[in-house]
Image (cartoon, rainbow, N blue to C red):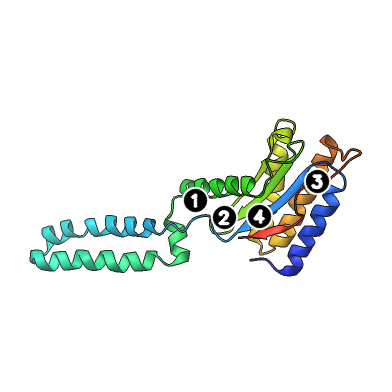
Amino acid sequence: MISESDKARVTKAIQVAEATTSGELFCVIAHQSADYRLVPISWAGLLALAVPLPLLLFSRWSGAWIYLAQLGVFLVMGIILSHRALRFRVVPRRTRHEHAHAEAMRQFFAQGLDKTTDRTGVLIFASMGERYAEIIADAGISGKVNQSIWDEAIATLVSAIDAGRPGDGFVGAIEQCGRVLAEHFPPGALKRDELPDKLLEI
């Protein structure tokens, strides 16, 4: 999803940003947040249920042939919709975003962003399969920074990912977050680097 050179650029951007703030930045890019394997089966089942009625009304097929047609539609559509590109298209947008948000929260806690000394952890998260990005800030930051600031950084990240430049997107989002963190949370006399400076690919 992202080259080693871009990962190095992201690491450098985090280091530069954190030099001006007591905030801690961490980035995660996910291939996908869930596999949604039951969704194609559900759609195939619904389509198969629609098969018998028109055949009963407008054909002279026997019950056995109608059953076979129904079974065939279920199997064929189940296989077609299970293709990754199509599978994500038939998952409702809200469902995709709920799963991606849940994965972002899991990563926030798994990477220890809730355990910084002054609760100043910030996660920049993107899930490619769901086409979803989110910034999660810990309690020490979230109440002091307007949501519109995070939204602008997310827009930078998403537009670059859509253009096939995820490295640029993360660097841009880090720079925007770093500026606002430096304004509200200066580094202080005992600035410590509590989290790894990197982009995690999962």
Work out whether residue 113 or residue 48 is closer to the camera in this orientation and state it: 113
Ranked by sequence position, the earlier of labels 3 and 4 is 4
Residue 125: x and y, percent?
64, 51
Report the mark closest to the observer, 4 or 1.
Answer: 4
Residue 104: x and y, percent?
59, 48
Amino acid of disc 4: Val
Work out whether residue 11 or residue 6 is closer to the camera in this orientation and state it: 11
Q: Quadrant of residue 54?
A: bottom left
Q: CA distance from mark 3 to mark 1?
A: 29 Å
Residue drawn at x 46%, y 48% is 95
Which of the image's four quarters has the C terminus?
A: bottom right
Is residue 75 depicted above or below 94 in this figure? below
Mark 3 sits on what residue? 178
Work out whether residue 58 can be spotted.
Answer: yes
Amino acid of disc 3: Gly
Label disc, if present, on residue 131 of the rendered structure: 2
Q: Quadrant of residue 137?
A: top right
Give the side of residue 130 with respect to residue 43, left or right.
right
Mark 1 sits on what residue? 96
Ranked by sequence position, the earlier of labels 4 and 1 is 4
Ranked by sequence position, the earlier of labels 2 and 1 is 1
Ranked by sequence position, the earlier of labels 3 and 1 is 1
Q: CA distance from mark 4 to mark 1?
A: 17 Å
Residue 30: x and y, percent?
59, 58
Q: CA distance from mark 3 to mark 4?
A: 17 Å
